[in-house]
């Protein structure tokens, strides 16, 4: 079992602080394992077992706690009067009204609360209202490529070409259990299909239960439409799209659908952490633009599952991986617009910008110029990087670094 050190360190940095720690992310990305690893760390540091109260709502033995009042009473009876009680509530969104229990536990002295959820709506409703300024979100993703190498043991296998491991990572994705299993196509696809259907059907239904009283939210009743939109978004990662363009695609395919419906269905996919949007950023005006986001899929294994092979594109797949790696590194990521030119990513961290172009290959002169030109035109002094899969253009071109993407992904980040 690989230790998710970056996430453990984030939790540890907030230990005993008076904020609720909220770990979010798609199903099976490792949230439950992270909580178990964190609890083990607490025990190793001298925290007593009776100081830890842990409930996983995926487990049947806790079904009686799905009533928030019963849950509150259950935890209250287990609090240590003279020591800090560490409270872990896994997949808390299953409890209707859970935010009331969390808020009541929060205001008690000597509590340190950690919750997880597989849908971001839990942070957009009553929880956010009750705990404004009193919670911190830790967004969790499937394995990075470096974590994948550690989990599979490839990191220690010098004889295995890095490109071969990277090709497998692009094909199977980074869900932790996939990296630990016998990765035949049949087994991987069966496992990923289970995750996908669970997220699409069950998690969206959970969302419905909490929002059906909201007259401004349409119910997600057409699962076929939801899957069609998901397939379309998966096929156009790396391309700017609007809600209107998605609606037009559906209408041209024979579906009668409004832009409002498309917007709600796309929002449901975002809330379930299947897709992440990236806003466009005006580099000159230093402001976000409202039109035409790009959408990236949280795991390429899922993308390969739902897309016909003919829709596969190497360049956009690499771009997808780089987008999520930048998120893992704590960056705010947007799409750069500089006049009529576009920069794949503008990564902001601690007020510092870094510009990235991503390409599978730029050995051809035309491709080289296409990737380099937008970076040359930007006149500020922030770092400019091109990430590529080819080995022939690696180097420094008047301050623009060209780096092999596998090297960039595997170098430890301080």
Image (spheres, rainbow, N blue to C red):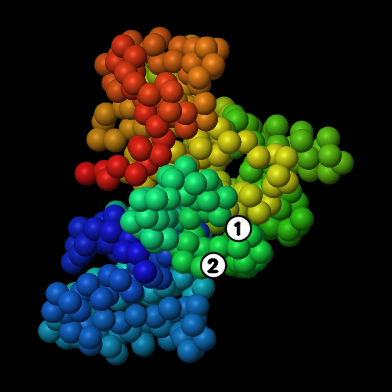
Q: Which residue appears at 27% of the width and 75% of the height?
A: 39
Looking at the rendered image, the quarter that the C terminus falls into is top left
Q: Which residue appears at 27% of the width and 29% of the height?
A: 352
Q: Which mark is residue 214?
A: 1
Furthest residue toward front: 159
Nearer the observer: mark 2 or 1; the answer is 2
Q: Position of residue 223 (x, y in %)?
A: 73, 58
Q: Which residue appears at 33% of the width and 56% of the height?
A: 156
Q: Is residue 142 left or right of residue 52?
A: right
In the image, residue 397 sits, relative to residue 293, either above or below, namely: above
Whether residue 125 can be seen here: no
Q: Is residue 197 left or right of residue 71?
A: right
Q: Which residue appears at 53% of the width and 51% of the height?
A: 168
- Work out whether residue 160 or residue 86 is closer to the camera in this orientation and state it: 160
- The residue indicated by pointer 2 is 182
Q: Is residue 410 left or right of residue 9?
A: right
- SS category of the residue bearing label 2: loop
Furthest residue toward right: 254
Instruction: Determine contact: label 2, label 1, CB under 8 Å.
Output: no
Q: CA distance from mark 2 to mark 1?
A: 45 Å
- Work out whether residue 370 or residue 131 is closer to the camera in this orientation and state it: 370
Q: Position of residue 161 (x, y in %)?
A: 44, 45
Q: Quadrant of residue 218?
A: bottom right
In the image, residue 48 sits, relative to residue 410, either above or below, namely: below
How dense is the environment of label 2, judged by Cα within 10 Å: few (below 14), some, or many (20 and up)? few
- Work out whether residue 95 or residue 333 is closer to the camera in this orientation and state it: 333
In the image, residue 377 sits, relative to residue 263, either above or below, namely: above
């Amino acid at each position: 079992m690989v230790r998710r050190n970056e996430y453990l360190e984030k939790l540890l940095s907030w230990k005993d602080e008076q904020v609720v720690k909220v770990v979010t992310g798609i199903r099976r990305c490792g949230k439950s394992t992270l909580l178990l690893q964190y609890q083990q760390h607490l025990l190793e540091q001298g925290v007593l077992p009776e100081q830890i109260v842990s409930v996983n709502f995926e487990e049947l033995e806790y079904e009686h706690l799905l009533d928030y009042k019963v849950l509150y009473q259950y935890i209250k009876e287990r609090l240590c009067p003279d020591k800090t009680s560490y409270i872990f509530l896994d997949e808390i969104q299953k409890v209707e009204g859970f935010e009331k229990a969390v808020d009541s536990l929060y205001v008690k002295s000597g509590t340190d609360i950690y919750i997880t959820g597989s849908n971001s709506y839990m942070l957009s409703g009553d929880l956010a209202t009750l705990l404004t300024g009193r919670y911190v979100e830790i967004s969790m993703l499937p394995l990075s490529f470096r974590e994948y190498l550690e989990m599979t043991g490839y990191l220690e296998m010098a004889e295995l070409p890095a490109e071969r491991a990277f090709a497998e990572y692009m094909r199977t994705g980074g869900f932790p259990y996939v990296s630990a299993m016998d990765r035949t196509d049949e087994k991987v696809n069966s496992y990923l299909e289970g995750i996908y259907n669970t997220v699409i059907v069950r998690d969206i239904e959970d969302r419905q239960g909490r929002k059906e009283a909201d007259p401004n939210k349409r119910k997600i009743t057409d699962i076929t439409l939801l899957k069609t939109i998901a397939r379309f978004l998966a096929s156009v990662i790396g391309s700017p799209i609007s809600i209107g363009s998605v609606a037009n695609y559906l209408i041209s395919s024979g579906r009668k659908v409004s832009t409002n419906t498309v917007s709600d269905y796309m929002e449901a996919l975002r809330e379930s952490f299947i897709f992440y949007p990236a806003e466009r950023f005006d580099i000159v005006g230093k402001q976000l633009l409202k039109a035409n986001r790009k959408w990236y899929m949280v795991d390429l294994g899922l993308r390969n599952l739902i897309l016909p092979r003919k829709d596969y594109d190497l360049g956009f797949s690499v771009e997808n991986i780089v987008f999520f790696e930048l998120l893992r590194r704590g960056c705010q990521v947007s799409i750069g617009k500089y006049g009529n030119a576009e920069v794949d990513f503008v990564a902001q961290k601690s007020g510092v910008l870094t510009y990235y172009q991503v390409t599978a290959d730029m050995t051809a002169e035309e491709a080289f110029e296409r990737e380099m030109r937008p970076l040359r035109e930007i006149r500020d002094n922030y770092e400019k990087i091109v990430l590529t899969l080819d080995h022939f253009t690696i180097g420094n071109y008047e301050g623009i670094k060209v780096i092999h993407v596998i090297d960039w992904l595997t170098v430890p980040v301080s």
